Structure formats: C-alpha cells, structure tokens
Image (cartoon, grey):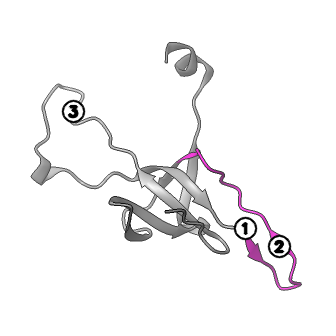
Amino acid sequence: MMFRPLHDRVLVRRIEVDEKTSGGIIIPDSAKEKPMQGEVVAVGTGARNDKGDLIELTVKEGDHILFGKWSGNEVKIDGEELLIMKESDILGILEKTEAKAKAA
C-alpha cells in the first residue's frame, strides 16, 4: 500500500539505537525508551502561508531526523509501525560528517 502524507506532515520509521551502554551493559527491553531518531519515509507537498503560497518542506525522503519524545501519531501500515508528524515536530536533521562517512 502506498501512503502519501498531506500538507506539512511526514511519515517516519523509527531507527533503533544500540542496545548497550558505552560501558557494555545490555539494556533489557522493559527499560528501553522508544527511539527519538527516525528515517523519513514519505513527505507531504507542504504548507500554505497566509498569501496562499506553497512552502515546501525542508526534510525529504531518506533524511535521518531527531524528534521529540512524544511527537507524532503512531500508525500501522502494511504491518509496520510508523509515525505521522508535522514537520514542526522535527527537531533537526542528522547529517553524517566526512570522517564517519569514510569509516562506514
């Protein structure tokens, strides 16, 4: 099934982070918090300003983002749990630095 968000909304897939602390302690499922990082799966066309002009979204499909703990609405599409949120709920885009990109 294809899903396209409307207006200034984005569809996000959560990105799981490491299950160990920096000291090597494994965190059990019951103590984990939901990740606040995600990958943008789909974006809407944008919002309209007071003059009616279309303002395109800053994020695009494939961007890795950081969002607030309680942001978005959880939905299940084709059996996958995803989030729908407004672009204003996104705190920022995570970008790889050149050093990390070369190591990957």
The one of 98 and 72 positioned closer to us in this rendering: 72
* Residue 78, above or below 23: below
Q: Which mark is residue 21?
A: 3
Which of the two labelled residues, at mark 1 and mark 3, occupies the earlier sequence position? 3
Q: Give the image location of residue 95, x and y in percent.
A: 59, 36
* Residue 35, above or below 90: above
* Residue 76, above or below 62: below
Are the residues at dot 2 and dot 1 in contact (C-beta closer than 8 Å)? yes
* Label 2 sits on residue: 54
Badge 2 local density, few (<14 within 10 Å), some, or many (20+)? Answer: few
Q: Nearer the viewer, mark 1 or mark 3?
A: 1
Q: Is residue 65 within the magenta segment?
A: no
Q: Which mark is residue 92?
A: none
Q: Give the image location of residue 55, x and y in percent.
A: 80, 69
* Label 1 sits on residue: 45
The reply, left or right, for residue 12 in relation to residue 20 is right
